[in-house]
Image (cartoon, rainbow, N blue to C red):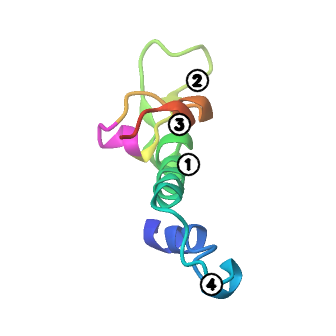
Amino acid sequence: MLSGRLSKKVSGGWRSGRLGGRGGPALGMWDARVILCWSEPNGLRPHRALREAGEGLPEGQRDRPRTPAMAIGWIDHIWSWEECLTFPYH
């Protein structure tokens, strides 16, 4: 799933005709695109199938939403866009 999505979002701008023969985008731009393509579906958007029952939740809420990155233990909460864009990835 990630590879198909990644190839569509990241490949924009790699054709030499579109860039006027200057080659591909800078490596920093590539890194930024990869990070955004990974972060949005895995750290920012909860997935229904990954919900877990929790105690101490607000009234009327039965399940705690989780992202794929939370499910495997990479992060401990759903990230905001601000956290995603200001996190030091290097």
Give the label, 3 or 2, closer to the camera. 3
What whole-number distance in Å separates the C-alpha atoms at marks 4 and 2? 55 Å
Query: Which of the two discs, 3 and 2, labels the residue nearer the N terminus?
Result: 2
- At label 2, counting other C-alpha atoms closer than 10 Å, the crowd grade (few under 14, some 14-19, many 20 or more) is few
Q: In percent of the image, x 61 and y 35: which residue is there? A: 81
Label number found at residue 84? 3
Give the label, 4 or 2, closer to the camera. 4
Query: SS class of the residue under badge 2?
Result: loop
**Picture coordinates of residue 13 (x, y %)?**
63, 74
Marks 3 and 1: in contact by CB < 8 Å?
yes
For disc 1, the marked residue is: 40
Task: Identify whether 3 is placed above or below 90.
Answer: below
Query: Which of the two discs, 1 and 3, labels the residue nearer the N terminus?
Result: 1
Task: Identify whether 30 is placed above or below 39.
Answer: below
Give the label, 2 or 1, closer to the camera. 1
- Which region shows up in magenta? 69-74
Which residue reaches farthest bottom? 17
Q: Quadrant of residue 21?
A: bottom right
What whole-number distance in Å separates the C-alpha atoms at marks 3 and 2? 26 Å
For disc 2, the marked residue is: 61
For disc 4, the marked residue is: 21
